[in-house]
Every structure is written in structure tokens, then in C-alpha cells.
Image: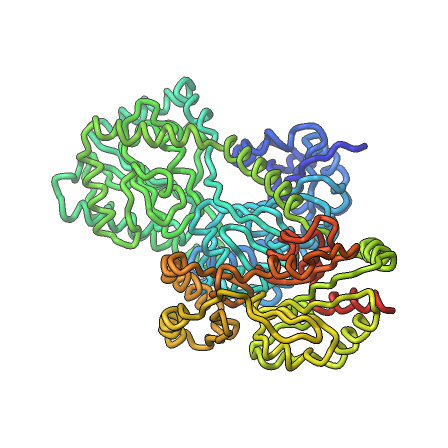
């Protein structure tokens, strides 16, 4: 038997490839993700699939594939045209601006979407050729949102995790994307979806439930019979790597020269990629405001600003760079002296040793993005401060602000607030710096990249165990054969059948679902067999069931058991039931109904039902929660029970229970075949009450106490027809 393996898939492989003298030279990437995932992909049969980062001509692809295979890496070769449409186009001109709330920059080009789909398919094809059932796949980031579903379709038995490294926007923003439903359902192929922060989780759950047929409870999404867990995993860094640089000779040399160059000056450091989401201009404006309002700091503070080049051929980025160049030029021209420069601006990348030296010498690190998934610069600065000094100023819009709350947290849009934070940092006592920095360092050390990887993989395993434990078995052909065989051999059969959502589908108008000809035929065929006792057990009013089935040889249980009628007898209500509580509950429900267009109250003899099937999605659920909270104490006092069903809330006497009613029906009888089918929370009482040998079937989902499930009323009818054919 082959051992199962782990497959990591991301847009880029963790390797740099350069062509030199006709040879391809490979060097490992230094990124935090590559470091963290190294513990996975470098082991045994595990692999990492991704684009190698350069356009390799077809005749040399085998050569590069062989080179990469030695590092457990599998390439997905993309043409320049594909990179342009899928990466530069869809990923960076649609998803990036929308996910960072810069919606005016989004360019919804159909050709980009076509390229995005094509490349995600290409990734799926390559992955498919390496995946065996039982393997675990971990897909990374916004360039591959369609991939989890594409893999799930090809390999249903695989465990799939997905992690998004950038923010996830609110529903109002995400819905602007023309292909929003496809992107959401693409992610539903995963078993576990991870984000940096709980805010992102919240946005995703809300978006998923509004743009698809998915429902969620807590952080578990149920979509097409599958449970998907959505969880926050704040990403860490390789803290040890940054700490160890204190002993690096090259770093020590850089530190010495920086300290000499900036003697008597307090240094403020900022490091970013050139991007409109990073808040670089606003940061410069805050620094300029400080020099203007507090001239005493002129000559005594300096801003070291590193901007790493990025996509400067794109108009928005080119324009941003010109604005930064101009603002830096203006500040320096206005305030510089012969021996002091306010802004040291570098438009280039630096080796990690130089960055480490800057992290160690800078008195303040200013990290103020407009929107950022995590922002690891802030954590790298903290990890580098081995003497516990220094001040971190951090944007509340960065994921890191949820963890590093001992930083000075600012709203990056508020220039005055950012300036005041710089002032506070410049004047912070050494004792306070150390208290704050120690707290942040212990956080960065504990929640490092290795714990992040471990937490995600452990949770993925836990999710698969949960899914297996919740899984009710589908009534497929072999199961149907077993049920039919037991049915044929039985001498006495009890069939408990729920009505709405089981024998018929739902309708927003509850009066429009009376039985059709096909259903009457099925019922007639079942009751024509003298060994069958058919019991319709429903939440419907007893008058309604009487009208529909009163003239058939069927037993009826109405209003979840409050009313009962054996064939040929009169209706009886449960003894000692009271409806005196109804007026008080109705008054509360009416106030909510008046505020909720589309909702209405159904009055049954011993229960009240609040329906919200026609209410705007989200509002109905919100009102239902408000009602539950409002009435919780009153219900307990009056001995009432609240049943939250499919777009309904039902208030009833606690004695009324479908499970008790079903057991009561079998009192002194021991049928050798029992079948119970239902779709609602109220039917769970029957499933739990019946003996373990009974065939209990949940309709519409596999999260249930029932032994089996069917997808919809059409499958229920097919099962019942099979008994009499």
C-alpha cells in the first residue's frame, strides 16, 4: 500500500531560477512561507507544485522538470500570455484591488477571467497526475481560488486545505466581482479554509451564505452535503532566523556604519513593496506634518524609507512611484540642511543582512498599510529587537495588529493620529519600550511560522475526523437493496413519513404544497399492502392533514404530536396541553413581524410558528436570533420549547415531541421493519427515539442522528416507489 503524501500548491515555487550561459541555475527562496513549509515538502514523497517563475521554452521543460524534481518540486509551465492574463490580469488587476478595498482600480476584463480559469485548470491537471486517494493537498492564495473544487471533482477522496494570504473583503465589496459565485464555489472544494484574522473569516462566511446555497453555523459551512471549516490562523515568521542575525559579522559591520552615520538622530524605519495598499504617501504626509508642527525635531529624526520595486510598468504603480518621488523630493528640499537629510529614500531591495541591521538600529518601525492580510515586516522588526527596545507603530488595518496589540495602533487614514503616534514613540521611556517589546516578542516567538504550519495541518486532520464522524451514509443502490430485502422479509412494517421537505419540496407560500397525483399514487400503493402501517407525522395543522389524507387508510400525527388520529378514529389532542401562553408570545412575534418584510406568523392549536422563508437572506437569520434571545427566559418559565427549523421558529409545549409520538404509536407493537424519513430538527427526535435497527433517513443533509440520508423529496419518492414496484 502506498503511503499517503502531502502536496503543497501555490502560484510560485519556493525557488529562484536564472538563466546564465545557457544553463538554468536554481537557488532556494528566502521567504517565510518557503521556510515554514520546508518542514513538509522536503520530506519523503511530499511535493510542492507551482510556476517556476520564468518562461521556459517547450524544448527545455524536461530539463527544468528534472532539476526541480531533485528538490521535490513540480513545475507548472505557463506561457507569457497565460501569466499576463491569469496573474498580471485577473489576480492583480481584479482580485488584489478588490480584496484590498481599492475597487476603483479593478479592471473586470472577460479575457482575464478566461485566462484565470484556464490556468487553474492547468494546475488541476498537473496536481491530478500526482495525487492518490488519501493524500493531503494544501492550496495557497488568491491566484488559485478555483483549484480546491477542480481537485475535489477529479479526486473526491482527497483532503484539501486552502489558505488565503491577503485579506478577504466584506460581502458588499466581494459581490462587485462579476464571477463571484464561481470563485466562492471554487473554494468550497476545500475541507478547511484558513485566513489570517477572524474579520476575514466573518466576511467569508457572510459572503458564502449570500452568494450560494451554503448555510453556516458557527464556523462550519455546509454545502452540497459537505462540511467545510473556516478558521483564522495568524501567520508567523521564522523568529529564530532574525534573532540569530545578532551574531552575524556582516550584520554587525552594517550596524556599526549605520550608528556612526546617524549619531544623535532617532531613526524611523519603513519597508514596503511598491503598492497602493501600503499607505506610503500617507506615512510621508504624517512625517512632514511632524517636521512642520514640531520644528525642534528637525535635524534630530530621520525616516529611512525602503520601497521594493514592484509592477512599475502598470499605470497605477508608476503614478504612485512618481507621487512618492515628488513628496520625498519636496520634504528633503524644504527641510534638509548641509549635514542632515530628513528622508533617506531607497527604491530597491536589500540583502537580508542589511535589513536585519536596519531592524536592530531603527528606534521606531512605522508599518501603516491601508489594508494588509498580516504584514510580516512588523513581526520581523519585533523578532530582531533582542534587547527589547524600540517602538512599533502599526496600522489597525494590518492583520498583525490583532496580535501585536502592544504596538502603537493607528488608523492609517488619519494623518494627525499617525503623527501623534510618532511623537509618542520618540518620547517613550526605555522602561515602557521594554515592557511593550517583551510582550510582543513573546507573541512572535510562540506563534512562529512552524506553529502556524502545525496548527493548520493539525486542524485539517481534525476536520476530516469530524466530517467522518458526522457522516450519515447515503442511500445508494447497495443500501436500497438491503432496505428492500428487509422490507420484503418483514411481517409488520411501520413507515413514519414527515411531509414538508420530505414528501414534497418547500414553497415560500405554505398553502401551495398540497399533495399531487404522484404522491397520492405512492401513498395508495403503500397502504394497499396489509403489512404496512403508514403514519404521516408533520408539523402541519391537524385540519390540513385531515383535508389531504383524512379519507385514506393512513394514521396522522399533526403539529409534531399535539394532535393524533388513528385511521377510522377521531382526532385526539395530547392531554393537559394549554394554549394560554400563546397571546404573550404572539405579541412579541408581531412586533418582529412588523419590522421584517416577508415574515408571517402561523397559528396552530398548541404552537405558534414564525416563518421567514421570504425574508431577505441575512435579515431573517438576524431577526430569528433576536427573537430567540428575547423569548429565551419566558419560554423556560412557561415550560415551552423553541424549535429552530428550516426558515421557521416554532414555539410549542415541551410535552409535544415527534419522538414521543412515534414511540407511543408503537406501544405494545414490535414491528420487524421501521422506516422514518424527515428533513427537519423536529425529526431528529424520532431518529433518536427509534430502536437502532430502524431505518432512519434524513432528507437534504448528512448532519443527523439518522443512519442514512437522501438529497431531496424526489429521492424519497423514488425510495418509496421502489417498495411497491
Residue 52 appearing in the image? no
Viewer-closest of 428 and 521: 521
Viewer-closest of 129 and 469: 469
Quadrant occupied by the N terminus: top right
Viewer-closest of 336 and 609: 609
Seen at 29% across and 44% down, the residue is: 409
- Residue 516 image-quadrant placement: bottom right
- Residue 22 image-quadrant placement: top right
Q: How is the image coloured?
A: rainbow
Q: Is residue 301 left or right of residue 155?
A: left
Number of marks in the rendered image: 0
| Residue 545: percent from left, percent from top | 63, 76
Q: Is residue 672 left or right of residue 496?
A: right
| Residue 117: percent from left, percent from top | 65, 59
- Residue 268 image-quadrant placement: top left
| Residue 354: percent from left, percent from top | 40, 29
In the picture shown, does residue 390 fall above or below 635? above
In the picture shown, does residue 431 fall above or below 89? above
| Residue 135: percent from left, percent from top | 71, 39
Q: Is residue 250 left or right of residue 430?
A: right
Seen at 58% across and 34% down, the residue is: 37
Viewer-closest of 239 and 502: 502
Seen at 69% across and 70% down, the residue is: 555
Quadrant occupied by the C terminus: bottom right
Seen at 53% across and 35% down, the residue is: 455
Q: Is residue 429 left or right of residue 373?
A: left
Residue 14 appearing in the image? yes
Amino acid at each position: 500500500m502506498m503511503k499517503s503524501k502531502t502536496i503543497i500548491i501555490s502560484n510560485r515555487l519556493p525557488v529562484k531560477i536564472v538563466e546564465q550561459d545557457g544553463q538554468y541555475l536554481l537557488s532556494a527562496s528566502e521567504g517565510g512561507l518557503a521556510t515554514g513549509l520546508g518542514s513538509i515538502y522536503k520530506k519523503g514523497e511530499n511535493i510542492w507544485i507551482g510556476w517556476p517563475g520564468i518562461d521556459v521554452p517547450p524544448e527545455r521543460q524536461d530539463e527544468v522538470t528534472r532539476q526541480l524534481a531533485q528538490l521535490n518540486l513540480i513545475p507548472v509551465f505557463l506561457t507569457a500570455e497565460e501569466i499576463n492574463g491569469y496573474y498580471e490580469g485577473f489576480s492583480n488587476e481584479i482580485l488584489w484591488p478588490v480584496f484590498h478595498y481599492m475597487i476603483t482600480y479593478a479592471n473586470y476584463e472577460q479575457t482575464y477571467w478566461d485566462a484565470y480559469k484556464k490556468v487553474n485548470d492547468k494546475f488541476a491537471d498537473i496536481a491530478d497526475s500526482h495525487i492518490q486517494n488519501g493524500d493531503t493537498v494544501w492550496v495557497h492564495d488568491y491566484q488559485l481560488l478555483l483549484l480546491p473544487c477542480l481537485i475535489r471533482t477529479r479526486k473526491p477522496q482527497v483532503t484539501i486545505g486552502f489558505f488565503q494570504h491577503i485579506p478577504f473583503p466584506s460581502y458588499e465589496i466581494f459581490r462587485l466581482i462579476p464571477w463571484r459565485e464561481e470563485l466562492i464555489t471554487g473554494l468550497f472544494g476545500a475541507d478547511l479554509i484558513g485566513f489570517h484574522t477572524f474579520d476575514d473569516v466573518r466576511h467569508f462566511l457572510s459572503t458564502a451564505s449570500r452568494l450560494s446555497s451554503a448555510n453556516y453555523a458557527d464556523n462550519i459551512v455546509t454545502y452540497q452535503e459537505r462540511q467545510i471549516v473556516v478558521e483564522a490562523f495568524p501567520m508567523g515568521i521564522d523568529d529564530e532566523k532574525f534573532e540569530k542575525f545578532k551574531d552575524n559579522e556582516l550584520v554587525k559591520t552594517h550596524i556599526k556604519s549605520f550608528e556612526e552615520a546617524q549619531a544623535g538622530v532617532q531613526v524611523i524605519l519603513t519597508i514596503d513593496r511598491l503598492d497602493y495598499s501600503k499607505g506610503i504617501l500617507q506615512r510621508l504626509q504624517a512625517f512632514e506634518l511632524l517636521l512642520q508642527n514640531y520644528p525642534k525635531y528637525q535635524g534630530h529624526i530621520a525616516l529611512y524609507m525602503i520601497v521594493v520595486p514592484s509592477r512599475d510598468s502598470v499605470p497605477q504603480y508608476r503614478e504612485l512611484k512618481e507621487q512618492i518621488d515628488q513628496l520625498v523630493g519636496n520634504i528633503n528640499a524644504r527641510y534638509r540642511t548641509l549635514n542632515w537629510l530628513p528622508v533617506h529614500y531607497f527604491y530597491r531591495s536589500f540583502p537580508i543582512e542589511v535589513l536585519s541591521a536596519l531592524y536592530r538600529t531603527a528606534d521606531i518601525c512605522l508599518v501603516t498599510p491601508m489594508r494588509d492580510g498580516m504584514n510580516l515586516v512588523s513581526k520581523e522588526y519585533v523578532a530582531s529587537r533582542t534587547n527589547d527596545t524600540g517602538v512599533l507603530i502599526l496600522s489597525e488595518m494590518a492583520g498583525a495588529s490583532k496580535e501585536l496589540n502592544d504596538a502603537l495602533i493607528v488608523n492609517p487614514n488619519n494623518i494627525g493620529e499617525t503623527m501623534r503616534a510618532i511623537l509618542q514613540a520618540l518620547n517613550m521611556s526605555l522602561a515602557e519600550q521594554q515592557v511593550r517589546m517583551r510582550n510582543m516578542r513573546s507573541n512572535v516567538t510562540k506563534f512562529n511560522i512552524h506553529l502556524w504550519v502545525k496548527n493548520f495541518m493539525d486542524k485539517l486532520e481534525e476536520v476530516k475526523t469530524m466530517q467522518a464522524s458526522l457522516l450519515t451514509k447515503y442511500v445508494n443502490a447497495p443500501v436500497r437493496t438491503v432496505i428492500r430485502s428487509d422490507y420484503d422479509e418483514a411481517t409488520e412494517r411501520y413507515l413514519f413519513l414527515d411531509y414538508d421537505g420530505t414528501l414534497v419540496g418547500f414553497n415560500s407560500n405554505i398553502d401551495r404544497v398540497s399533495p399531487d397525483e404522484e404522491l397520492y399514487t405512492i401513498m395508495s400503493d403503500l397502504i394497499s399492502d396489509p403489512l404496512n402501517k403508514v403514519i404521516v407525522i408533520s408539523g402541519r395543522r391537524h385540519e390540513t392533514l385531515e383535508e389531504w389524507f383524512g379519507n385514506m387508510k393512513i394514521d396522522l400525527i399533526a403539529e409534531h404530536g399535539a394532535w393524533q388520529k388513528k385511521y377510522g378514529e377521531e382526532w385526539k389532542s395530547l392531554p393537559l396541553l394549554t394554549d394560554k401562553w400563546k397571546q404573550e408570545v404572539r405579541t412579541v412575534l408581531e412586533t418582529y413581524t412588523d419590522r421584517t418584510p416577508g415574515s408571517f406568523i402561523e397559528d396552530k392549536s398548541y404552537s405558534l410558528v414564525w416563518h421567514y422563508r421570504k425574508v431577505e437572506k441575512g435579515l431573517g437569520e438576524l431577526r430569528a436570533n433576536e427573537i430567540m434571545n428575547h423569548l429565551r427566559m419566558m419560554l423556560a418559565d412557561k415550560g415551552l420549547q423553541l424549535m429552530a427549523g428550516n426558515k421557521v421558529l416554532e414555539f410549542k409545549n415541551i410535552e409535544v415531541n415527534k419522538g414521543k409520538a412515534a414511540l407511543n404509536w408503537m406501544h405494545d407493537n414490535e414491528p420487524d421493519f421501521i422506516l422514518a424519513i424527515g428533513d427537519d430538527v423536529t425529526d431528529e427526535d424520532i431518529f433518536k427515539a427509534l430502536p437502532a435497527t430502524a431505518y432512519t433517513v434524513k432528507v437534504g443533509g448528512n448532519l443527523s442522528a439518522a443512519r442514512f440520508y437522501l438529497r431531496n423529496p424526489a429521492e424519497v419518492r423514488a425510495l418509496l416507489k421502489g417498495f411497491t414496484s
